[in-house]
Amino acid sequence: MSRRYDCTDAEQRAAGLTDAASAVRRGELVVLPTDTVYGIGGDAFTQSAVARLLEAKGRGRDMPVPVLVGTVRAANALVENLGPYGQDLVDAFWPGPLTLICRVNRSLSWDLGETKGTVAIRMPLHPVALDLLKDTGPMAVSSANRSGAPAATTAADAEKQLGDSVAVYLDGGACADDTPSTILDLTTAVPRLLRRGAIPVEKLRGVIGYVATDADPATED
C-alpha cells in the first residue's frame, strides 16, 4: 500500500521525508513536489528502480530519465564538466526550472535509458524536494504522470495515475504553475534550446549570450 504525507504539516513532513528516503534506498519509487510539476523518482544508481519508474509511466528506454540533485557539488560529480557556460547558468538559475544536458561522467555505473552518453540534470527550487535529495543523493525523476497524460499538479493527481506503483507520496500542495523546466543542451559548441519552459530564452541570453533556438515545436509543451 502507498503511504501519503501532508508536507504542509511539520510532523507529517518530517515523517514523510524519512519514509521517502528509506523507500528510495530500498529501490522503491516516491512522488515529490517540485517547483514545476510533481515528479516520480527513484535512486538514480539502482537499475531496477529506474526500470520500475519507466514501467510506472508506461515509457520506453528511448526517453531517458532526467536526474535531480540537491547540491551543485552532486551535479558536478555526475558530469564530465559543465563546459564554458554551465557554471554561469547554475549560478544564475539554480535552484530553479532549468535542466542542463551535459556529457555524463563515464566512470559512473548507472542506466537511465538510451542517453547516448549524456545526462539531463536539474536542482529544483522546492524545500521538500531539496531536503529529500540532500538525504538520498541524485534521483532519477520524471513528471508524475502516465506517458502522454497531463502532468500532475497535485499529489492526488499523481496518485490517480500511478497508484500503488509508488511507495510514498509527499504532498506539498498544488503547484503554482504547470510550466515545465527549460531544457538547454550544453553538449554542443553553442548552447541549444531543446524545450521552452519556465525560464525564457531572453534570460538565458542575458547570462551567456547566444543560444541556438532550433527547438522542435513538438517538444515545447
Image (cartoon, helix red, strand yellow):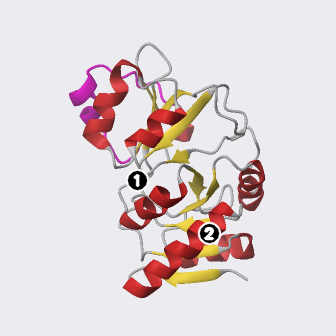
Residue 22's disc is 2
| Figure quadrant of residue 164 | bottom right
Give, as a three-letter code, the residue at label 1.
Pro
Q: Which numbered marker is on residue 124?
A: 1
Label 2 vs 1, first from the N-terminus: 2
Which label belongs to residue 180?
none
Q: Looking at the rendering, which quadrant does residue 73 occupy?
A: top left
Up the image or down, 212 lies above or below 3; here it is: above
Residue at horizontal 71 percent and vertical 58 percent from the top: 57
The image position of residue 218, as x and y in percent, is 56, 39
Quadrant of the frame with the N terminus: bottom right
- Against 10, residue 71 (above or below) is above
Residue 28 is inside the magenta segment: no
Picture quarter containing residue 128?
Answer: bottom left
Where does the magenta region start and end?
197-216
Instruction: Tell me which residue sits at (44%, 13%) in the image.
Output: 189
Position in image of residue 139 (x %, y %): 57, 52
State left or right for residue 106 relative to residue 84: right
- Of 54 and 146, nearer the camera is 54
